[in-house]
Image (cartoon, rainbow, N blue to C red):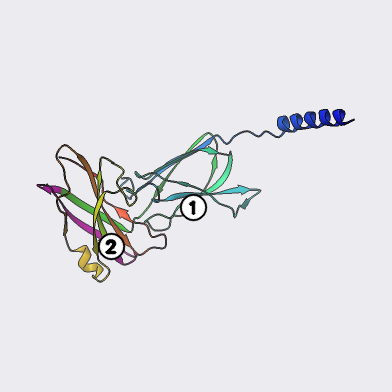
Amino acid sequence: MKKIILILGVFALLYSCKTDTYPMPSETLTGALVLEDGSPLLTEQPNGFRIQLNEVVGGKISDLPQYFWGKPDGTFNNSKIFRGDYVVQPVEGAFFPVDPVEIRIEGTTRLTFEVVPFLDIMADVTNSGADLVVRYRIRKAQGAGKVTTARVLLSKWNPNVGMNRIDQEVVRDLSAVDDGVISSTTYTDRIQDCLESGVTYYVRVAALSVNTAGRYNFSEVVKLEM
């Protein structure tokens, strides 16, 4: 009797394994966040921005969102999504809120969102001997929070320089400076005796205005070969 029960149990297990399989998610959502002029949003990875997906089932929007991270050049891609209707929205980035879009994700679906960053940063990178010298301007968008901090970020060999990938930095506290003064000022910061001959460095400027996600805006990455 025990042998019969054991055999029946094995068959039940095999049957359940065979019938409880589901197709893996294989649809793709890809796209980009761009500025008004069509240029890419400059950010970092991770912690640059996320794409939020809320599935629409029977005309009702799910209150259990899915998320995935965007890339430093403002693009995003997820090839593991179940086919269906979704409300899609970029969130948690250093830009003003973006209206959500309802779409059907089937095959490869592409989306482009136009965003307005809180800050626009222009930087010029040079060296003076072994010193790094960075001149930059910070322009604040109307309605953005108070500008509090600017950082010159230096990475050795790593082109993905950002808040989580730096070897050296210099921080400027702007919390007590009027935003109008900040926007009209060209700042110069220097990291002394940090550059070595034969080494490639990557440099950019990050600046923070008060926002709920605590995200920084960034200048373009500059490659500096010594």
Q: Residue 100, which numbered label?
A: 1
Tell me the amino acid under the disc marked 1.
Pro
Residue on which disc 2 sits: 149
Give the SS element for disc 2: strand
In the rendering, at what x and y percent does residue 138 appear? 24, 59
Q: Magenta residues, as a range?
A: 126-148
Secondary structure character of the magenta stretch overall: strand
Instruction: Name which of mark 2 and mark 1 comes first in the sequence.
Output: 1
Report the residue at 25% width, 57% height from top. 151
Give the SS element for disc 1: loop
Is residue 17 positioned above or below 137 on the image?
above
In reply to whether residue 131 is colored magenta, the answer given is yes
Image quadrant occupied by the N terminus: top right
Q: Residue furthest right?
A: 1
In the rendering, at what x and y percent does residue 219 appear? 26, 50
Residue 12 vs residue 160, the one in the foreground: 12
Report the residue at 25% width, 67% height from top. 179
